């Protein structure tokens, strides 16, 4: 049976590049699985149902809440976003490190349920760079960009609650930094109680002959 994987929370300002980082780390290393969220927001151009999100009607999303099919959900810019339970639990059991790319309200809920979950916050190097990246996307009106920047001001209040702050300046460096965090999490003593017990017992047998 595979060693259980780690659940990871990756949050960050819209435009900070967390989606790019999480996709890149999954392409580079095969131990990761990226949870696909459900949302009621409309798909952006190029987004595919079942790949980027499960795009649902409000009623369908509320059904998922009712049958307890979500690990967490939150409302963001007047839409629902939530993490379907089944995929996450299946991949963790198969030994994958499962990344939840979610906003702060959802992150705090997951952390309450699973306190061992490392929380990583992705930021651009500065507010100016963040605003440039949001405008550069070209997918959203200036009004929506302003809404996302205002939301960033609110979200920045929660940065201290996170375990790691990942500055996304160069993509490759950010991917490697995230991978190092995960490797470090894997060797924490509290995740290795079985190994510790084996070594203790092994040592006793060795000494006592
Ligand atoms: P976007 O509309 O830009 O794809 O995402 C908006 C925000 O919703 C982002 O901060 C993203 O991380 C967050 N988000 C995406 N999926 C989920 C989810 O399943 N749960 C929660 N709580 N937030 C999510």
Image (tube, rainbow, N blue to C red):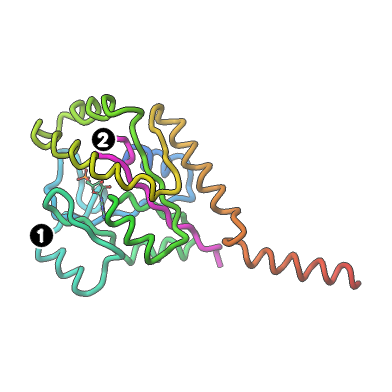
Q: Which residue is mark 1?
A: 57
Residue 86 lies, with reference to residue 127, above or below; the image says: below
**Mark 1 vs mark 2: in front:** 2
| Residue at the spot 91% in from the left edge and 72% down from the top edge | 209
Chain-order first, disc 1 or disc 2: 2
Name the dominant secondary structure of the magenta segment: loop
Image quarter of residue 56 = bottom left
Q: Residue furthest right?
A: 209
Q: Residue furthest bottom?
A: 67
Does dot 2 land on a helix, a strand or a loop?
loop
Q: Position of residue 178 (x, y in %)?
A: 46, 41
* Left or right, residue 17 beside residue 201: left
Q: Position of residue 195 (x, y in %)?
A: 67, 64
| Residue at the spot 49% in from the left edge and 37% down from the top edge | 177
Stretch in magenta = 1-18
Within 10 angstroms of label 1, few (less than 14), some, or many (20 or more) residues? Answer: some
| Residue at the spot 38% in from the left edge and 50% down from the top edge | 161
* Left or right, residue 73 beside residue 209: left
* Left or right, residue 187 beside residue 105: right
Whether 67 is among the magenta residues is no
Quarter of the picture containing the N terminus is bottom right
The residues bearing labels 1 and 2 have C-alpha atoms spaced at a distance of 25 Å
Q: Which residue is mark 2?
A: 15
Res 176 label: none
Q: Position of residue 169 (x, y in %)?
A: 39, 27
Tell me: is circle 1 under 8 Å from ligand 1.
no
Image quarter of residue 106 = bottom left
Q: Position of residue 116 (x, y in %)?
A: 47, 60
Residue 175 lies, with reference to residue 87, above or below; the image says: above
| Residue at the spot 23% in from the left edge and 44% down from the top edge | 154
């Amino acid at each position: 049976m595979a060693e259980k994987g780690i659940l990871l929370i990756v949050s960050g300002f819209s435009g900070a590049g967390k989606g790019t980082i999480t996709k890149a780390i999954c392409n580079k290393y095969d131990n990761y699985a990226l949870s696909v969220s459900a949302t009621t927001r409309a798909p952006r151009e190029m987004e595919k149902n079942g790949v980027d999100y499960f795009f649902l009607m409000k009623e369908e999303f509320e059904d998922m809440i009712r049958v307890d099919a979500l690990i967490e959900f939150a409302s963001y810019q007047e839409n629902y976003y939530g993490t379907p339970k089944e995929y996450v639990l299946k991949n963790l059991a198969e030994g994958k490190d499962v990344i939840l790319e979610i906003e702060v309200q959802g992150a705090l809920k997951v952390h309450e349920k699973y306190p061992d979950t490392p929380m990583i916050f992705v930021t651009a190097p500065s507010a100016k760079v963040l605003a440039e990246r949001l405008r550069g996307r070209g997918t959203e009106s200036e009004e929506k960009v302003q809404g996302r920047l205002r939301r960033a001001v609110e979200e920045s209040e929660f940065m201290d609650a996170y375990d790691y702050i990942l500055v996304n300046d160069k993509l490759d460096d950010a991917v490697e930094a995230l991978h190092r965090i995960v490797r470090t999490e894997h060797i924490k003593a509290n995740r290795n109680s079985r190994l510790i017990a084996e070594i203790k017992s092994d040592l006793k047998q060795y000494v006592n002959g």
